[in-house]
Image (cartoon, rainbow, N blue to C red):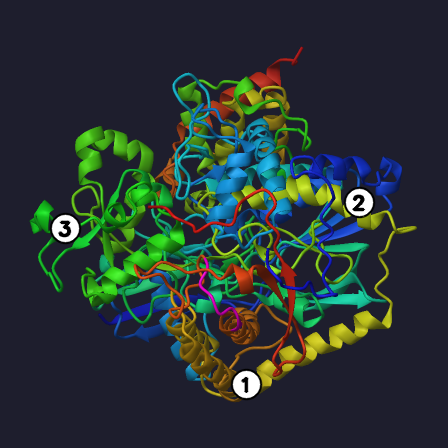
Amino acid sequence: MSAVETSSKLDAKIPAGPIAEKWTRYRFENKLLAPNNKRKFHVIVVGSGLAGGSAAATLAEQGYKVTCFCFHDSPRRAHSVAAQGGINAAKNYQNDGDSVFRLFYDTVKGGDFRSREANVYRLAEVSSEIIDQCAAQGVPFSREYGGLLANRSFGGAQVSRTFYSRGQTGQQLLLGCYAALNRQIKSGGVTMVTRHELLDIVQVEGHARGIVTRDLKTGEISSHAANAVVLATGGYSNVFYLSTNAMGSNVTATYRAYRRGAFFANPCFTQIHPTCIPAAGDYQSKLTLMSESLRNDGRVWVPKKQGDTRKPREIPEAERDYYLERKYPSFGNLAPRDIASRAAKEACDDKRGVGPGGRGVYLDFKDAIARLGKDAVAARYGNLFDMYNRITGENPYETPFRIYPAPHYTMGGLWVDYNLMSTIPGLFVIGEANYSDHGANRLGASALMQGLADGYFVLPATIAQYLAGFKGLVSDTRPAAFREVEQDVKGRLEKLLQVGGNKSSASFHRELGQVLWDKCGMSRTEAGLKEALGKVKDLRERFWKEVRVPGRIDQLNPALEEANRVADFLHMGELMCHDALQRDESCGAHFREEHQTPDGEAKRNDQDFCYSSAWEYTGDDAVPTLNKEPLEYENVKLAVRSYK
Amino acid sequence: MDLTLNVWRQERADAPGKIVSYDVPGVDEEMSFLEMIDVLNERLIEKGEEPIAFEHDCREGICGSCSMVINGVPHGPQPETTTCQLYMRHFKDGDTIFVEPFRAKAFPVLRDLIVDRSAFDRIQQAGGYISINTGNAPDANATPVNKEASEAAIDAAQCIGCGACVASCKNASAMLFVAAKVSHLSLLPQGQPERYQRVLNMVSTMDDEGFGACTNQSECEAVCPKGISVSYISRMNRDYLRASVSTPV
């Protein structure tokens, strides 16, 4: 048990009772809203990915009046669409010893004991219902010959609990919730507003009462009011410039909410995914993930000899180092992501990396093809092999994949209580945008699970608690607060257009990404983080003097959209470094070089750091204030996380 | 390599557009097509000119955002490849490349290479779903699905909604898109209760949105980045005929 005191500003509102009964009891004790009353409440959902889309559809099914916003031309393009590998659920269809408790345990352990027990248990509990819901919607999961659902394994688990749809599980789940959303749009339950970007949130009397958006087609700035606002706006991996996220994924919604008083939790917990295609040159615009599912059958290796330039097939078996199998014999190639990423970096730092610049390791299917045959491998992973071939021009059936870690997911996000409400009353945060369930490292196939758990099952139940306090519909954008925020938003956009320098915003974004990747990426040190804090601040000052944003505010202007997002990333990078510096321990994806075991594993400090860090905004250039939520483990014993 | 790019520039929906020529020297063959345009855009911004507006997002070939016609072919010359996954190694030094937006009456140009494809959303709102509320589902394994049907449903469901099928068709028909959507659900047992009403509603919305008719040229299949087969169009036509001539009960 840690001696950390809870900040008086944080109340996690965890229900009483044994962990397995909390959610059931909570729902029973929750206030119910009659259907005819639900019509009187208006909810704004921002984002239409798995979390936002499922929440908007479900809230409308329950009778609420819902308006859903997305910045894409269609809700189907949200970045959830790109998830490849799968979605976890504690179905135990394989009869291999899985259970709700095991999924809960694996997730808490996978997160290196930095997540809130009650939330994670609830996630594991609703996981089964998600699969039922999606199958009933017509999501075409991969199946066995008997017609039942197929499963595969993912990192950090010794059971097979991952459901999938070939290599495009994200798109199929998203199309399922997009279909549910379309049904509600058709029936009038959801008003869908596309090509609108949230630029700020509005509070009236201390409660979130609406948002200010920019119409990306016309540039019009407008206000929208509601009884509650739900942010489902995804993660901030693009702070690193190069990441597996889509080009448009950004931090603006959550960062703007942070500036207005929502605490940002664990911003330094950022996941670096081990299996991505290495960068090819300076012009590289994003990195492409190769699904972790490849590690089911592929074997990761580097040459034993430093600087070995032979072709992979010319290196004999005895001269290869299958380092994951060697270091982690019980999990082998399925070691969790943070561990596999660091091991790859270690091999490359040791000059045993392969490909251009020595920043790559092999992922080899030779043995799998010999064991299963090329056809069976193609049936499981064909689309991933094709994608790799399209991008690199190499054929992975004949020569091993070259892979390297890349920023992929952010465990950090806005702090939320058990109700998924932030520190601003009435502002709810779901999916990757919140911080709640994955601790310091997320396990594979758990992001889709969390997005849909929050959207289909958790938020629709918890938001009623808050709405029950209202007398009627909120749709009035006349309060002065809306005008003030609109003016703020316009002022900022005009300021961007007026800088009149001669550099693109992308050039600043690239520089920011390089600083963070070097100093706040896979491994971090006190000196490096202090250096990064200075560099990011300088970069931000230069940005506001030297950037050039072409075009006008009142037109479709992608360059203005990008500049506005980069401006927020330049603040977010600083917040991450503050958090990484303050957390003077290693845990999960947060690896401080000062804190490691003799064999290079992360060394946690539960005595002093067993808490979530919730940062409070104090000014654009001020150091934020830290609020601590101690983490109490009553059902899982704090232990050294071993995958050996 | 050094290239010449001839790009459609159009400031807004109701403004006239024209082809503008740009020299793009120093293109690396490991760049993607969109990275090549990124490089050109950065140069334009530094010179004080307006960058080329184009739609893009995941750059992994799955979100369906990219919508360029490259040398007359939607998504360019590589089979089963979206523009974002097209690499410059497929071009050669000295090439002149024409880049235009997807063109169809139902896809008006918004700016430069960006078009409005919201008609696709409205077609799906007309019935591209199975009516089930959250929380009503039986156990997922309570309804086994024949493996062949399941695989055929996945093949159809791979559609990324990019609209290349429409852009390639001389009639600007959306039949391959609608057929993929209809077939995905009609192949599964879960989709049966609404099967015939669904096809009628979606086809009628497709017509209302201004898409043309199908004249069986299969250009849609040839450009589809997911290789979706025109046999789904036949499947949809069978359902449509059945729905039109019979009553459900």
**Residue range corresponding to the magenta coloring:** A582-587
SS assignment at label 1: helix
Image spot of residue A25 (x, y percent): 75, 36
Say which quarter of the image contains residue B138.
top right
Q: Which residue is mark 3?
A: A320
The verdict on a common chain for dots 3 and 1 is yes
Q: Secondary structure at mark 3?
A: strand
Nearer to us: label 1 or label 2: 2
Identify residue for label 2: A464
- Residue A612 place in picture, x, y as percent: 59, 60
Q: Is residue B48 above or below residue A310?
A: below
Q: Earlier in the sequence, mark 3 or mark 1?
A: 3
Where residue A280 sits, quadrant-wise, is bottom left
Q: What is the three-letter code of the residue carrying label 1?
A: Trp
For the residues labelled 3 and 1, the Cα–Cα distance comes to 50 Å
Tag 3 subunit: A
Is the residue under label 1 in contact with that under label 3 (CB below 8 Å)? no
User: Could one spot residue A331 in this view of the protein?
Assistant: yes
Please state the chain letter of the residue tagged with numbered disc 2 in the rendered image: A
Image x and y of residue B70, in percent? 35, 57
Q: CA distance from mark 3 to mark 2?
A: 58 Å
At mark 2, the secondary structure is: helix
Q: Residues within 10 Å of mark 2 (few under 14, many from 20)?
A: some
Image quarter hosting the N terminus of chain A: bottom right
Q: N-terminal of the two: label 3 or label 2?
A: 3
Asked if residue B54 lies in the magenta stretch, the reply is: no
Q: Main secondary structure of the magenta part?
A: loop
* Amino acid on which disc 2 is placed: Ala
